[in-house]
Image (spheres, helix red, strand yellow):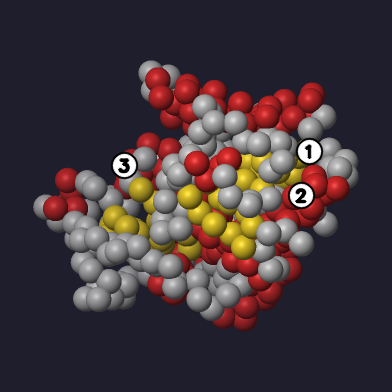
């Protein structure tokens, strides 16, 4: 039996609620249910020391100057690529981005096992050429009732408030956007432009947009709700018309998996794994990143809607198709055990 597994990252995997942190948290939960001890660290000495059987790293957040011992299985998880993001957002003068991408290439070549959340990532071709162990595994959806047990401190946001004093109730039917508006990859400008007219629906934003129009009341359709934990977000999504993910670049957005697993409609651009997810699930609508087309889609959804029965059926269908987080954790565990036993896992996809 495995003694312990280390998840190493320069970011706080244990307390954050971003996509990478949620993935790390759910891997830990799944492995702990199977009897494996899982530890988080950003201490370089932990990589070589300790009795860890495996080291898991994420994205570009790992120490390129510290070799992981051959006695420990190195599993690297690709949530996307920095180069893909830079091209999509035209961030060609972002020098740190090139270094981050170099680290991703390094991990792609050196790791014992590579897990990618998107089958279309170009770095997978390097693994194929090297005939090294590769797994394609979508991010999961939360099956537990304690999704909100790990939360971040609430922050006061313009036009928002604290968790204790704020209610997500909005008078008009609403869509939801979840993400950091200052991150250019999220395409917040496009989303903002879709809610500047006099429509019959609003936009709930978590944690919030940082826009001048919100301060002077020029964007009455947009409501900043502040920070929320996972359980609160699930409640917010449940009362919405749908979720908006109009990103310029994505891997496999966890919030999309969460929304679809609850039967909630999703309007998204065709990036990352989203087109493949749309083919296999119900309720994911792919749109071009153009204002008029997005608005037309939102109007149709707001007008037609779905009944509680239809939503329940969609929820049941999607949960049978989309992987729960337990499947991701099992893929990690199987990869470690197979690597220790020398099993050939080239191009393996978990069943």
Residue that numbered label 3 is attached to: 182
Q: Is residue 69 above or below residue 293?
A: above
Q: Is residue 248 above or below residue 225?
A: above
From the top left corner, tell me how far across and down residue 350 is, in percent. 80, 53
Quadrant (top left, top right, bottom left, bottom right) of the N terminus: bottom right
Name the residue at the left extreme: 216
Residue sitting at x 54%, y 23% = 102
From the top left corner, tell me how far across and down residue 293 is, in percent. 48, 45
* Dot label at residue 29: none
Spatial separation of the CA atoms under disc 1 and disc 3: 36 Å
Name the residue at the bottom extreme: 309
First along the sequence among labels 2 and 3: 3
Does any portion of residue 133 appear in the rendered image? Answer: yes
Task: Tell me the SS state at disc 1.
Answer: strand
First along the sequence among labels 1 and 3: 1
Asked which quadrant contains residue 130, the reply is: top right
Foreground pick, 288 / 332? 332
From the top left corner, tell me how far across and down residue 74 is, in percent. 67, 41
First along the sequence among labels 2 and 1: 1
Disc 2 and disc 1 in contact, CB within 8 angstroms: yes
Task: Tell me the SS state at disc 3.
Answer: loop
Spatial separation of the CA atoms under disc 2 and disc 1: 9 Å
Q: Is residue 101 above or below residue 4?
A: above
Specify whether 206 is left or right of 75.
left
Foreground pick, 77 / 299? 77
Specify whether 101 is left or right of 335.
left
Residue that numbered label 1 is attached to: 133
Callout 2 crowding tier (Cα within 10 Å): few <14, some 14–19, many ≥20: many
Task: Tell me the SS state at disc 2.
Answer: helix
Residue that numbered label 2 is attached to: 335
């Amino acid at each position: 039996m495995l003694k312990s597994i280390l998840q190493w990252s320069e970011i706080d995997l244990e307390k954050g609620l971003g996509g990478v942190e949620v993935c790390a948290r759910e891997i830990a939960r799944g492995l702990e249910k199977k009897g494996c001890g899982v530890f988080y660290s950003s201490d370089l000495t932990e990589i070589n020391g300790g009795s860890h059987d495996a080291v898991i790293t994420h994205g570009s957040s790992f120490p390129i100057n510290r070799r992981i011992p051959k006695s420990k299985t190195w599993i690297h998880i690709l949530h996307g690529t920095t180069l893909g993001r830079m091209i999509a957002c035209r961030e060609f003068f972002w020098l740190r981005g090139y270094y981050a991408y170099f680290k991703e290439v390094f991990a792609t070549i050196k790791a014992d096992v590579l897990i990618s959340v998107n089958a279309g990532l170009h770095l997978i071709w390097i693994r194929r050429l090297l005939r090294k162990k590769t797994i394609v595994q979508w991010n999961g959806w939360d099956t537990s009732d304690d999704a909100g047990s790990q939360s971040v401190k609430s922050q006061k946001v313009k036009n928002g408030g604290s968790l204790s004093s704020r209610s997500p109730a909005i008078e008009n039917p609403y869509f939801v956007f979840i993400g950091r508006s200052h991150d250019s990859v999220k395409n917040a400008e496009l989303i903002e432009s879709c809610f500047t007219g006099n429509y019959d629906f609003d936009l709930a934003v978590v944690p919030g947009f940082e826009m001048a129009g919100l301060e002077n009341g020029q964007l009455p359709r947009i409501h900043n709700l502040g920070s929320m934990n996972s359980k609160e977000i699930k409640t917010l999504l449940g009362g919405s018309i749908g979720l908006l993910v109009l990103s310029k670049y994505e891997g496999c957005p966890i919030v999309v998996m969460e929304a679809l697993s609850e039967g909630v409609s999703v309007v998204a651009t065709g990036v990352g794994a989203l087109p493949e997810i749309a083919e296999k699930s119900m309720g994911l609508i792919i749109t071009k990143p153009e204002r008029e087309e997005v608005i037309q889609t939102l109007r149709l959804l707001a007008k037609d809607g779905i009944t509680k029965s239809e939503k329940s059926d969609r929820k049941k269908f999607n949960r049978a198709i989309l992987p729960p987080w337990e499947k991701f954790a099992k893929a990690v565990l199987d990869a470690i055990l197979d690597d220790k036993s020398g099993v050939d896992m080239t191009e393996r996809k978990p069943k």
